[in-house]
Image: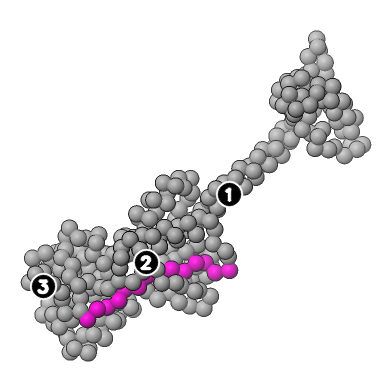
């Protein structure tokens, strides 16, 4: 190739290939037909390739022109894709939102927030993983998640959790349980019924254990599980009574009676961003929706 091509020549060539005539190409590029003809001549001279033939007054592309057009189209489609991506980023940020949360939040809090978010961002891909706190920390630090929410302590080097909501534990039981008529359940009441408990590493269970030790309470038996949902369903089957967050109790309100527990055991929900990267517009918007959701709970 004798001389380098310029963008004006490429645009003129593409316009002619798309429209079929130099006149139509001139209209597309807001110029004149003679200007398009001159530009095509310059392109053919610079490239050293015969791109068009004139037959019966019609401009016909050569096979070489068609092959060049394929390459030009790939280039322009790539530019259009870039422009579409920029427009999408301006509107909604990165088109992926990755959330990690503890199971109870995935059951009781996130569904309504995600639903509202998707109404405004229908094309955004959302991943919602309900996992344990250790996996949550590792996932944030490795960049697997944009945000994480937990009712357990997720503090660790590199993460800066913020308090999103604070509430208190409630005691769940069958609706006809002997304690169902009480306005609140005291830790001393646990001495008389099977206890449905979280696993030993759970912060809520550890605080409960401290209270039972302080008050000399020993339940007749214990059923231990990892999930608040399981405690609620076991309570619904009269297997015992147990402490859960108000989040979990609200989901199973039709199955169990939930009574305030005293002395109060706080349930805190913390949120942390992935470190070393600024939150996307999507992430920021989602967190604002979470704040509004928790505020509406008035916990």
Q: Does dot 1 land on a helix, a strand or a loop?
A: helix
Mark linked to residue 182: 3
Eyeballing the image, is 11 above or below 55?
Answer: below
Residue 65, image x and y in percent? 78, 27
Dot 3: few (<14), some (14–19), or many (≥20) neighbours within 10 Å?
A: few
Quadrant of the image for the C terminus?
A: bottom left
Q: Mark 2 vs mark 1: which is more N-terminal?
A: 1
Q: Which residue is mark 2?
A: 102
Residue 269 placement: quadrant = bottom left
Residue located beneath label 1 in the image: 90
Residue lying at the far top in this picture: please name it: 56
User: Which residue is painted at 22% across and 88% down in the image?
Assistant: 213
Please check the rendered image and state whether residue 124 is part of the magenta-colored stretch, yes or no: no
Taking the magenta stretch, the answer to whether it contains residue 271 is yes
Q: How far from the left and from the top, in percent, is residue 9?
A: 82, 33
Region in magenta: 263-276
Residue 199 appears in view:
no
């Amino acid at each position: 190739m004798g001389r380098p091509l310029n963008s004006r020549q490429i645009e003129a060539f593409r316009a002619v290939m798309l429209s079929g005539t130099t006149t139509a190409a001139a209209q597309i590029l807001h110029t004149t037909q003679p200007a398009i003809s001159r530009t095509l001549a310059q392109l053919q001279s610079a490239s050293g390739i015969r791109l068009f033939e004139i037959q019966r007054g019609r401009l016909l592309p050569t096979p070489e022109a068609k092959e060049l057009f394929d390459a030009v189209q790939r280039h322009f489609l790539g530019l259009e894709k870039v422009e579409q991506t920029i427009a999408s980023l301006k509107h909604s940020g990165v088109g992926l939102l990755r959330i990690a949360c503890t199971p109870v939040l995935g059951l009781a809090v996130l569904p309504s927030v995600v639903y509202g978010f998707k109404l405004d961002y229908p094309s955004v891909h959302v991943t919602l993983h309900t996992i344990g706190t250790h996996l949550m920390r590792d996932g944030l630090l490795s960049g697997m998640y944009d945000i994480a929410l937990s009712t357990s302590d997720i503090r660790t080097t590199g993460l800066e959790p913020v308090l999103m909501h604070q509430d208190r534990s409630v005691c769940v039981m069958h609706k006809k349980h002997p304690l169902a008529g009480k306005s609140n359940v005291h830790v001393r009441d646990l001495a008389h019924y099977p206890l449905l408990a979280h696993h030993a590493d759970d912060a809520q269970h550890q605080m409960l254990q401290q209270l039972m030790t302080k008050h000399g309470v020993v339940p007749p038996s214990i059923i231990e599980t990892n999930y608040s949902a399981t405690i609620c369903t076991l309570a619904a089957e009269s297997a015992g009574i147990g402490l859960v967050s108000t989040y979990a109790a609200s989901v199973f309100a039709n199955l169990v009676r939930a009574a305030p527990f005293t002395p109060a055991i706080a349930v805190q929900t913390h949120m942390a961003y992935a470190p070393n990267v600024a939150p996307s517009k999507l992430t920021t918007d989602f967190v604002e929706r979470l704040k509004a959701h928790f505020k509406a709970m008035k916990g």
